[in-house]
Amino acid sequence: MQESTSILRLVTTLLVVLLSLNMFEAKAQQEPQYTQYMFNTVSVNPAYAGTRNAMNILALSRIQWAGLQGAPITHTVTMHTPLNNYKMGLGFSIVSDKIGPVDNFYFNFNYAYRVNVTEKMILSMGIKGGIYNYTVGLNELNVGEGYDASFSGKIEQRWKPNAGAGLYLYTDRWYAGFSIPKLIQTDLNGNTTTAGNLSSLKRHYFLMAGYVFDINHDFKFKPSFINKVVEGAPPSTDVTAQVLYLDKYWLGATYRFGDALAFLANIQLNKQLMVGYSYDFTTSNMNSYNNGSHEIIVSYDFDGFLKKKVISPRYF
């Protein structure tokens, strides 16, 4: 009887794992999702490294589909800095993305080189390299009272190298970027692949842009968007409208087509420190199974060691 129960639990767990993997294949969006993407650009585009004219450290945590067991939880830490004497930028990003029994870990090193297109327009060209760890574990699953050896280990764990590239064109009023965070398509057994197998790392394409308009002396308006494209899935597009008051308070809303409506608020506490929060209302069929998504962001600019001081506020 106990053996039959253990087998049943194991089969159930395998179904959960397969459903998690199938969700990746169906949606084909393996890159973490961010509502406050406009402040977290370096996570998806290495060319953004060093464009703030100050060393920047950013931390972001996202709880997606709150109340749904096994829903995605993402934690991100990034750091990047300019090397102005060399027109370069350097940085790194660390991402932990957990979905049910699947743990994804990314570490990337970013390098960017900047050239002046005009006096006020700059083109930054970036590359990144890093490692990706994929783990499917059983030991964190709730199997009730007692101990079951069938749930004490991991189904598999893989470490994979990868690389990415991006372009970022900007002035002090607008930006436009294109990036491919993962250039190498491999399955999780380590083979290069173009097939649509279940557990493969897909190549994603990101297109983004934003503009800051002056409404009057006190208010500014900033529309922006990000579009994510990957083989085997329809594009995912976020369109955002934000209003900046007194160069200090950001208020805005984002619509993610076919998925969610989000509201976000950010405060520039001083010239260096910004904090923000966003809440997503799910508009898809998932609406009945969760209580929305929460995202918190903290960003800090260190400008003490640079000759060029931080301009307040940073629009992007």
Image (cartoon, grey):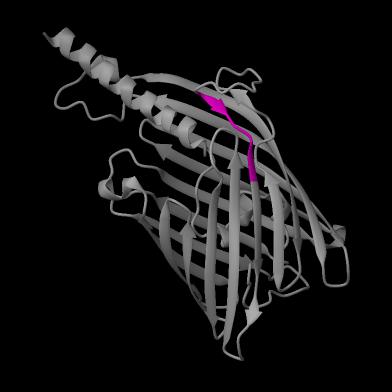
Please check the rendered image and state whether residue 198 is part of the magenta-colored stretch, yes or no. Answer: no
Q: Position of residue 14 (x, y in %)?
A: 33, 20
Residue 162, above or below 307: above
> Closer to the camera, 291 or 246?
291
Q: Image quadrant of residue 163?
A: top right
- Residue at 88% x, 64% y is 117
Residue 118 sits in quarter? bottom right
- Residue shown at the point (48%, 37%) measured from the top left: 27
Read off the magenta span. Answer: 199-205
Q: Outermost residue toward the bottom? A: 217
Image position of 275 with respect to 48: above or below: below
Along the horizontal axis of the image, is 17 left or right of 176?
left
Residue 286, percent across and down? 32, 46
Image quarter hosting the N terminus: top left
Q: Nearer the viewer, residue 266 or 308?
A: 266
Which residue lies at the image location 53% right of the left edge and 72% below the top edge? 242
